Image (spheres, grey):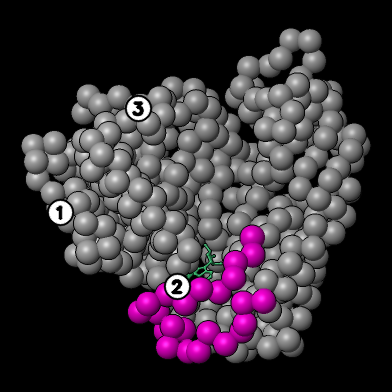
Amino acid sequence: MNVRDSEAVAALLSAAGYEEAASEEDADIAIVNSCTVRERAENKAVGKTGYLLAAKRAGRLKAAGLMGCAVQRLGESVFKALPGLDFAVGPRRYGAIPRLIERALAGESGMLEISGPDEVPQSMDAHGDCGFRAFTTVLLGCDNRCSYCIVPDVRGREYSRPAREVAAEAAALAARGVKEITLLGQSVLRYGRRNPAFAPDDPPSPGGYREPFPRLLEMLQTIPGLERIRFTSGHPSGCTDELVRAFAEMPKVCRHLHLPVQSGSDRVLKEMGRGYTRARYLAAVAKLRAFDPEFAVTTDVIVGYPGETDADFEDTRSLMEEAGFDNAFVFKYSPRPGTRSALLADDVPREEKERRDAVLLADQDARGAARNARLAGTVRRILAEGPSARNAARWSGRDGGNRITVFEPGAAPPAPGTFLDVRITRTAPQTLYGEIA
Ligand code: 5AD
Ligand code: SF4
């Protein structure tokens, strides 16, 4: 989401006549985008901005700003933490940035732009030169109130962008060569639930879809040139029969869902206020895999939530095994000011959080290895991205399930953004290897 926000701001600035600097050292103006979901992320962003302000004092920068969730959380106090900061902008006010830069260059400083929770943001659809893949934010904010999570406080209430606007943006991207689009929202399957995303005069769904999110997918599915549609993040309550039908009927919709579980313990899930039990979560996964056993499911897990016992942790381990995740991101619990769980003692020691983190990652490595091994010998449709990060002589791309696939490009390397059929010859926990079929 932050990558997409940075890109949208960069596009706004290009439109206003600014140019991207070749490197940080060459820049006249610098803006740091921040995240406050965990304390460490916020500290990193604030630390980096402090370093830029030193460069400004030394005369190497003309203006410096901070954007993102941390600004919304810190409010005016951001200028105490960062004296000399020219401007600070919260998530729904990014449209103000070009004007703030002008004012900063004219000598103003300490300008704060934060929004109320219901504000509808402007300038959501700016895209720069994005190549063959693009993100688009379709649902802003979050109305779930998970006990540990600061997102609802800093990203505001849920707001779904009109389906027509999203479709027009996707069509414009496809016309510029974008093959794959990823729809973003904290709880993207809640699209069109709080505010209507479809207008009464929008054409009815040809496939008879009644739920707004599958209906949006159906609209995007007809855009010429657009080949793949992805979205993130999901929630079990959104894994409806219609969503499963959309996955099954719409060939452009990739068979992958990022479905954060957070814990496998019913007791902890209840304390977190996640709105599902372990059984209900597993039922959602089973539903997705029922029509395609290779359907990729990935997740987020938190270790060391207040009061998480060994037994709770073992429940998380066993849930992860039962769900058969294709990939997992593990986070060590970090208390965030103003959240419900911040009132509880952060009582799992740091070393124990680290131990649990390491155990889950080792489990996931073994599980990923076993799941990927089943794909050896299959031929997969890969969107080729370019030379692989580790070895420039090889190329990498991703299959529909978002699995990284490394292959020999052959004598005439394909253009980035080309679809290729790759036969898998070898597999690793997080990577498939193969040759062009
Ligand atoms: N501590 C640790 N991890 C968190 N996440 C959200 N809030 C916290 C927190 N306070 C994790 C969740 C979420 C991911 C984006 O970040 O797992 O899915
Ligand atoms: Fe945070 Fe829960 Fe909303 Fe995800 S669903 S952004 S964890 S409050």
Question: Which residue is pictured at 51% across the width and 38% down the height?
Answer: 181
Of the numbered discs in the image, which one, if any, rests on residue 123? Answer: none
Point out the tag, 2 or 1, that comes first from the N-terminus.
1
Q: Which residues are magenta?
A: 329-351
Q: Is mark 2 within 8 Å of ligand 2?
A: yes
Question: Which residue is pictured at 33% across the width and 70% down the height?
Answer: 153
Per the image, the residue denoted by label 3 is 26
Q: Amino acid at mark 1?
A: Gly
Q: Where is residue 272? Give x, y as percent.
A: 52, 81
Single out the mark in the foreground, 2 or 3.
3
Single out the mark in the foreground, 3 or 1.
3
Per the image, the residue denoted by label 1 is 110
Distance from label 2 to label 3 (Cα)? 37 Å
Placement of 46 over or under 142, stated as above or below: above
Per the image, the residue denoted by label 2 is 149
- Magenta highlight on residue 31: no
The 10 Å Cα crowd at callout 1, few under 14, some 14 to 19, many 20 or more, is: some
Position of residue 73 in the picture relative to residue 4 (left or right)? left
Question: Which residue is pictured at 71% across the width and 56% down the height?
Answer: 327
Q: Amino acid at mark 3?
A: Asp
Label 3 secondary element: helix
Q: Are marks 3 and 1 in contact (CB under 8 Å)?
A: no
Distance from label 3 to label 1 (Cα)? 24 Å
Q: Amino acid at mark 2?
A: Cys
Q: Where is residue 129? Give x, y as percent.
A: 41, 25
Label 2 secondary element: loop
Q: Nearer the viewer, residue 381 or 60?
A: 60
Question: Which residue is pictured at 55% across the width and 66% down the height?
Answer: 235
The 10 Å Cα crowd at callout 3, few under 14, some 14 to 19, many 20 or more, is: few
